Image (cartoon, rainbow, N blue to C red):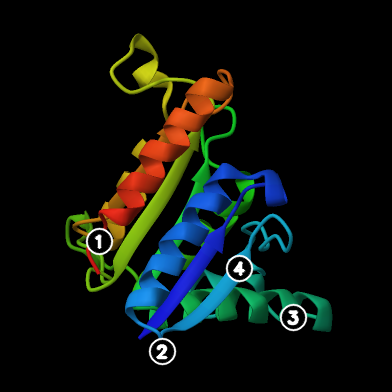
Amino acid sequence: MKLLHIDSSILGSHSKSCQLTAAIVAKLKQAHPRIEIVYRDLAATPPPHMTLASLPVDHPSSAFAGPLDDVAQRVRDESKRILDEFMVADIVVLGVPMYNWSIPTQLKAWIDIIVVPGKTFRYGPQGPERGLVGNKRVIVAITRGVFYARTAAISAEHAETYMRTVLSFLGVNHPEFVVAEGVTTGEENKARALAGALAGVQKLEL
C-alpha cells in the first residue's frame, strides 16, 4: 500500500494543517506498519506553475511547447514525477490551509499537474466525463482562520468547496474531510478547533 502525504502550508512547524496531516498519517501508519509513504512539502519545494513546457508529458497540450532545453526538461520531468506519485498512491492525505478565501498557490500548481485528460479524467462527446481515479482514498485536512460553516460567510469559503469540486471531477466519490476553523480567533477557539479536528482524525476508518 502506498500513501502520498502532501502539505501546503507556508507556516512550517507552526502550521495547524500540517499538525492534522501528521496525525492522520500516524494513525494510518499505526494500522498499516508496512505502508510506503511519499511526502511532499509544496511550500518548501513548490511545484512548477502551469505552462505548456511545465505540463507533464502525459498531458496532450504539452506537445505544443515544442522542443525543450535542459532546464525546461527538468521542470517537465518533475511534473511527471508529481503525476506519477499521485497515480500510484492508494491513499492521498492533503493539508489545505485556507489563504485569502482559497487554497495556497502551491497546491493549485500541484492540482494543475495532476488534472490530465486521458490520465485522471477523460473527455466524451458532451465534454469532460467522470474522472478516472475513483479507487483512491483521499483525506483532506482543512484549516480556516475564522468561522465559515453555518454562518453568513460560508459563500466566501473557496478552499473546501474547491477541493470537493476537484476531487469529484477526478472521480473521487467519497473524499474525507477533517476541518478546524476559527484557529486565528483566539487561543480558546484555536484549542477547541484543533481538539475537535484531532478527535475527527481518531474516528477515521482504517
From this view, report whether residue 92 is shown above or below residue 2.
above
Q: Which of marks 2 and 1 is in front?
A: 2
Residue kind at label 3, given as amino acid type:
Arg
Cα separation, mark 2 vs mark 3, equals 32 Å
Residue kind at label 1, given as amino acid type:
Val
Cα separation, mark 4 vs mark 2, equals 19 Å
Which residue is disc 2 drawn over? 34
Point out which mark residue 40 bears. Answer: 4
Q: Can residue 159 be seen in this view?
A: no
Cα separation, mark 4 vs mark 1, equals 21 Å
Residue at 39% x, 14% y is 153
Q: Which of marks 2 and 3 is in front?
A: 2
Q: Is residue 100 visible?
A: yes
From this view, report whether residue 6 is shown above or below residue 57.
above
Which residue is disc 3 drawn over? 74
Residue kind at label 4, given as amino acid type:
Arg
Task: Determine whether, in the image, residue 145 is placed left or right of residue 138.
Answer: right
Q: Nearer the viewer, mark 3 or mark 1?
A: 1
Residue kind at label 2, given as amino acid type:
Arg
Q: Which of marks 4 and 1 is nearer the N terminus?
A: 4
Check disc 2: other Cα within 10 Å, few if <14, some if 14-19, many if 20+.
few
Point out which mark residue 172 bears. Answer: 1
Cα separation, mark 2 vs mark 1, equals 24 Å
Q: Which of marks 4 and 2 is in front?
A: 2
